[in-house]
Image (tube, grey):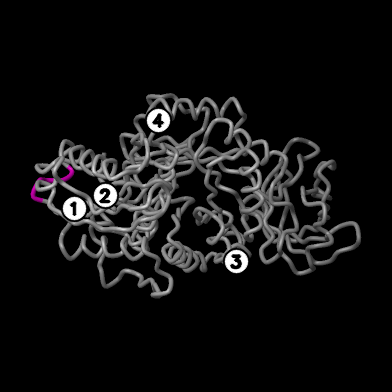
């Protein structure tokens, strides 16, 4: 496996998810498996999740929701509707009406009321564009902007228009309940526009007392505009460049990606860059130079994770795609130039003890040449905070909850492991630290002469980090029982 700090999310279909396949992807460096609820049944979810857990309990499992998306209805003939530039057709919002060459129906009941004349409707990821040239109380009159086709149940995007649809559909709720039932780790909620969309998902999770974390998928301008309140509410964010690239002018995508990564670091939340990162490898064994550069730039910007979609879900070269992504990420991490790193302002008043000590540990990694940063983590917060500062050395988090360990699977540079706990005491702190050091020594990840940092807390479970210990590995291990951690 290529050693890299940037995490990899891989989309897996229930049509190709046997244990050996998932094991091969894990061997190449995947950290999280993503499942798309739009294309899977409960039986499919269970199949994927069971096989993922059979491979490793360290792999995070993420389920996508559909969110407030708009789609065309089925066509009357079952065939695609062929349209020509300049054709006129009506658009209505009624799920019970089939689409015809004269009238296309979509799943947005108030589309006629909400969409003004002059707007553009983009069908099937922008393959066919319709411009609204007039409207009545019953329909939008649209002019076709390019030769194309309109198929059954294809996506519809309306750039610049705030879509007045509920955040969670009945299918979404069912998908979330399945995720809760089978103990997934993340819900990636689609088309998040503001914090209420996140809170709507959290309300369902709270009903079941579920620890699942929410990743907000940013896919339109409204989500970008409200990114601060979204980061304040969600566990993390996904830069979902597919729909985002349709909803906003495509030339703005690099700037938005850079902004969302910067905000993630400010809020100390994980961020995932997704969509078409190695799209060529769906059909070809090698990526384009542009794709290689795209992944490297995401790493240079400071992303926590990068994602594969069709490349691993149904592509011809899934294992090669993961290997390629891991190799590019690792090379980019090594070639980062300090003077080119995006400066992220941290005001003094934004620091609490955990943030302050985490920053000092990362500074020590650079200035003292630490071999590793180690932390025991009850909620994962300390490890996430360290990740935000993008440490040059590995970060090892010892968690007393296996779910917390998997939730760190999207955090840059953090390797999390589960260790059962009977409570945080002075003895337990020492036990965690010594076990971690001995394990890392056995795996050859550190040497006895290395300096390491240990971040922990003095006040019990979930009370935050209160001390930073920097010591030589050999001194601690050799001292064993006579070594004391600075705990009251």
Q: Residue furthest right?
A: 137
Q: Secondary structure at mark 1?
A: strand
Q: Which residue is mark 4?
A: 22
**In this picture, which residue range is highlighted in magenta?**
445-449
Query: Front-most of 247 and 362?
Result: 362
Residue 447 is one of the magenta-drawn residues = yes
C-alpha distance separating marks 3 and 1: 40 Å
In the rendered structure, are the residues bearing label 2 and label 3 in contact, judged by CB atoms less than 8 Å apart? no
Quadrant containing the N terminus in the rendered view? top left
Q: Residues within 10 Å of mark 2 (few under 14, many from 20)?
A: many
Q: Nearer the viewer, mark 4 or mark 1?
A: 1
In the rendered structure, are the residues bearing label 2 and label 1 in contact, judged by CB atoms less than 8 Å apart? yes
Chain-order first, disc 3 or disc 1? 3
Please tell me which residue is depicted at 38% across the width and 71% down the height of the picture: 344
Q: Which residue is mark 2?
A: 374
Q: Which residue is mark 1?
A: 452
Query: Is residue 382 at least partly visible in the picture?
Result: yes
Chain-order first, disc 4 or disc 2? 4
Q: Secondary structure at mark 3?
A: loop
Q: Secondary structure at mark 4?
A: helix
In the rendered structure, are the residues bearing label 4 and label 2 in contact, judged by CB atoms less than 8 Å apart? no
Mark number for residue 226? 3
Chain-order first, disc 3 or disc 4? 4
Q: Residues within 10 Å of mark 3 (few under 14, many from 20)?
A: some
**Image x and y of residue 415, in percent:** 31, 44
Would residue 109 appear left or right of 224 to someone viewing this image?
right
Chain-order first, disc 4 or disc 1? 4
Query: Front-most of 143 and 214?
Result: 214
**Image x and y of residue 66, in percent:** 64, 45
Please tell me which residue is depicted at 25% across the width and 67% down the height of the picture: 337
C-alpha distance separating marks 4 and 2: 29 Å
Query: Is residue 285 at least partly visible in the picture?
Result: no
């Amino acid at each position: 496996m290529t050693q890299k700090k940037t995490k990899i999310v891989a989309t897996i279909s229930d049509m190709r998810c046997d244990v050996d396949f998932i094991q091969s992807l894990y061997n190449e460096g995947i950290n999280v498996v993503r499942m798309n609820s739009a294309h899977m049944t409960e039986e499919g979810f269970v199949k994927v999740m069971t096989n993922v857990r059979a491979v490793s309990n360290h792999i995070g499992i993420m389920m996508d929701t559909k969110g407030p998306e708009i789609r065309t209805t089925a066509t009357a003939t079952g065939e695609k509707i062929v349209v020509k530039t300049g054709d006129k057709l009506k658009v209505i919002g009624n799920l019970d009406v089939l689409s015809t060459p004269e009238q296309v129906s979509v799943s947005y009941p108030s589309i006629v009321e909400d969409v003004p004349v002059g707007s553009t409707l983009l069908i099937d990821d922008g393959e066919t564009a319709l411009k609204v040239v007039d409207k009545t109380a019953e329909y939008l009159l649209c002019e076709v902007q390019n030769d194309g086709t309109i198929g059954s149940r294809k996506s519809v995007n309306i750039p610049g228009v705030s879509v007045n649809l509920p955040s969670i559909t009945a299918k979404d709720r069912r998908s979330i309940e399945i995720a809760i039932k089978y103990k997934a780790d993340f819900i990636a909620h689609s088309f998040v526009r503001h914090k209420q969309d996140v809170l709507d998902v959290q309300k369902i999770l709270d009903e079941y007392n579920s620890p699942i974390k929410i990743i907000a998928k940013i896919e339109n301008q409204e989500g970008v505009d409200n990114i601060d309140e979204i980061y304040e509410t969600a566990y993390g964010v996904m830069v979902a460049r597919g729909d985002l690239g349709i909803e906003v002018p495509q030339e703005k995508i690099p700037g938005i990606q850079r902004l969302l990564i910067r905000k993630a670091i400010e809020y100390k939340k994980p961020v995932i860059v997704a969509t078409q990162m190695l799209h060529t490898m769906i059909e070809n064994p090698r990526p384009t130079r542009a794709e290689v550069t795209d992944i490297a730039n995401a790493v240079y910007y400071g992303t926590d994770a990068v994602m594969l979609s069709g490349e691993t879900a149904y592509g011809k070269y899934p294992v090669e795609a993961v290997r390629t992504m891991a190799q590019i990420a690792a090379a980019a991490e090594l070639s980062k130039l300090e003077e080119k790193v995006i400066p992220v302002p941290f005001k003094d008043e934004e620091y609490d003890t955990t943030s302050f000590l985490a920053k000092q540990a990362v500074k020590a990694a650079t200035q003292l040449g630490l071999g590793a940063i180690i932390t025991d983590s009850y909620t994962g917060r300390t490890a996430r905070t360290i990740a935000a500062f993008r440490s040059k050395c590995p970060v090892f988090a010892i968690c007393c909850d296996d779910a917390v360990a998997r939730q760190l699977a999207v955090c840059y540079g953090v390797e999390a492991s589960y260790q059962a706990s009977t409570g945080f005491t002075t003895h337990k702190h020492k036990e965690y630290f010594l076990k971690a050091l001995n394990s890392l020594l056995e795996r050859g990840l550190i040497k006895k002469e290395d300096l390491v940092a240990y971040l922990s807390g003095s006040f019990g479970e979930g009370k935050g980090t209160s001390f930073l210990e920097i010591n030589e590995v050999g001194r601690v291990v050799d001292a064993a029982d006579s070594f004391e951690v600075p705990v009251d």
